[in-house]
Image (cartoon, grey):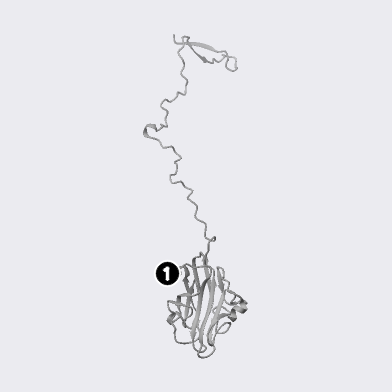
Amino acid sequence: DAYTAVMGWHVAATVPYGNNFDSNPSTGQEWELSTTNSGIITVTSSLSPASSPNQLLLKGLANPGGLEEAILHVNLAGAISAMLTFKQKETGSESDNALPSYFTGSVNADGVSFSVDGYNWYSLYSLTGSTSSQTYQQLSVNLNNAAASVGLQLGSDTRIKFQHYGPGQIGFAFDDISVTAVMPGNQPPAQPASSTPSQTPSMTPSLTPSQTPSTTPSQTPSLSPSLPPSSSPSRSYVPTPAVGTGRSPSRTPIYIRIGK
């Protein structure tokens, strides 16, 4: 198609991915754009973007209008908890065209869907009724859960389709589109095993009653050594003061017999 001829073949974006349509080009190789009849897809600053200065606009130029499809390619192989978040509003009042829960190829309807092969599409949001209004509202969906609910896994070229169908110059505006996920190799490290052993050793040895040590020795040692029996009389040293000399007591020992 003309878009592919200008922009080149589509390249799946990596996550985290975010686009508020303010950069140039704001729809790069991760986007695949398609329209029928008078439908157009453009990036514009008119009609009050959710975040200035620009937004993505899908609308018709004149009756009978047409179908506009903006398909985002994103690499979600191995992704955990991939979340799509976007803001959407209507640019005027028009009849609703409900998006079926499943379709192949293209369908004249209003909503957001996903595909893992580019042919089989599964609805994420039917942008009808209270889900779509003329005031911007933010919508989010877990892509892993959506894929699992229909027995699929997200792949390296997961496609997310934003589409509008209707007559005249009424259409949809999208802004602040993001896809986030936890990817292989970026998961938080596993928590280390507890450093506390399952059985914490006691700092005090476990003792059985028969082994409980007494804090008082069974035999308290005498502070005065026991004197062995002696056949010789005991002798004590008693200092005797010198008389009338005014000097220090005599250091001459006097031995007094004690005992036998």
Query: In the image, what residue type sits under mark 1?
Result: Ser
Q: Tell me residue 233's x, y (percent).
A: 47, 10
Q: Tell me residue 53's x, y (percent).
A: 59, 80
Q: 255 above or below 107?
A: above
Q: 146 above or below 184?
A: below
Q: 157 above or below 60?
A: above
145 or 203, nearer to the observer: 145
Question: Which quarter of the figure has residue 150?
Answer: bottom left
Residue 53 in sight from this viewpoint: no
174 or 119, nearer to the observer: 119
Q: Which residue is mark 1?
A: 149
Quarter of the figure that contains the C terminus:
top left
Label 1 secondary element: helix
Q: Tell me residue 222's x, y (percent).
A: 45, 23
Mark 1 is surrounded, within 10 Å at the Cα level, by few (under 14), some (14 to 19) or many (20 or more) other residues, namely few
Residue at horizontal 56 percent and vertical 72 percent from the top: 18
Q: 236 above or below 58?
A: above
Quarter of the figure that contains the N terminus:
bottom right
Q: Check the image and name the residue furthest to the bottom.
A: 63
Number of dots carrying numbers: 1
Residue 181 in sight from this viewpoint: yes
Q: Tell me residue 102's x, y (percent).
A: 43, 76
Residue at horizontal 51 percent and vertical 73 percent from the top: 159
Q: Check the image and name the residue furthest to the left.
A: 209
